Image: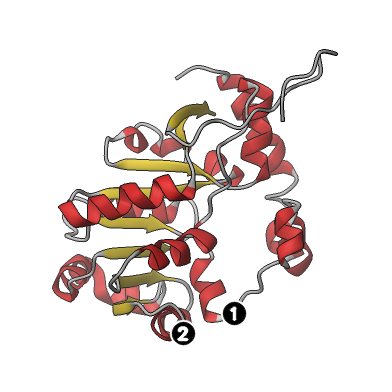
Amino acid sequence: MSAIDDGRLHAERVPATPQLTWLGGYRVQSLTRERLAEDLLEALDSGRKRQVFFANTNFVVQCRPLRARLEAPSVCVVNDGIGMDLASLLIHRRRFAENLNGTDFIPYLCAQRTRPLRFFLLGSKPGVAVQAARHLVEKLGQQVVGTCDGYAEYAEAGDGLVERINASGAEVVLVAFGNPGQEAWILDHCVACDAPAMFGIGALLDFLSGNARRAPSWVRTLHLEWLFRLGLEPRRLLKRYTWDMIGFFWICLRAGKQS
């Protein structure tokens, strides 16, 4: 969209090259999925470490104690959801280059690789990671070298979990503990973990396993997937999309454009 003369807010998309957008005190990278995938595949080939987080409104609210650690050079925070776009419009008068989320990006990343990636899946309820692994192998043509649920199996693994991940030869670790648990776990263990790429992926394993439904494509095109999910899980998500949303915009407005 181009600027218009009557003074209404213009919303030009940012270019495909990475650009930093500060929201709520977080350094969020504005870039396309092609650019993000290119950077991650280069990191995988060179052994450089990357920790990737998909920042939605809940991330901004819940991960505030981690903000300083999220500015590490190896960390990449990207935008997820219409709320982030609206906040960027309000504060910076520009939108993000593209909406990025783990549910769509991980399958896209798999498709860009000429050989299978080696995944380790961590988190979610018992059995979910195993079902998600089946989808990654059978539908996306990837390798899954290990799984661990986020309940009894995780508790039993204890301090030996990182050794287990390293022994598996995983290149990519997907962590599904929710915000801020998955972000804290990745930041705590990324140095000891040999896997070059680690992602905080929220509900991705539920979607891959078939335990959760995606919104129809036309709903996602209209940026209304949040409303679809609210309809499916009103008790769990009502607070997130009401009071927490107010808190999100308050945090962003209070921080303003400051870095």
Instruction: In this rendered view, identify the residue nearer to me: 245 or 95.
Output: 95
Query: What is the image's colouring?
Result: secondary structure
57 in relation to 205, above or below: above
| Label 1, label 2: how far apart the Cα atoms are | 9 Å
The spot of residue 121 in percent (x, y) is: 36, 72
**Which callout, 1 or 2, points at the residue further toward the start of the chain?**
2
User: Going 23% across and 69% down the picture, which residue do you hit?
Assistant: 170
User: Residue 246's image quarter?
Assistant: top right
User: Going 75% across and 45% down the picture, which residue do you hit?
Assistant: 242
Circle 1 residues within 10 Å: few <14, some 14–19, many ≥20? few
Query: Is label 1 in contact with label 2 (beta carbons under 8 Å)?
Result: yes
On the image, numbered disc 1 is attached to which residue?
211
3 in relation to 66, above or below: above
Q: What amino acid is at disc 2?
A: Gln
Instruction: In this rendered view, identify the residue nearer to me: 114 or 222.
Output: 114
On the image, numbered disc 2 is attached to which residue?
131
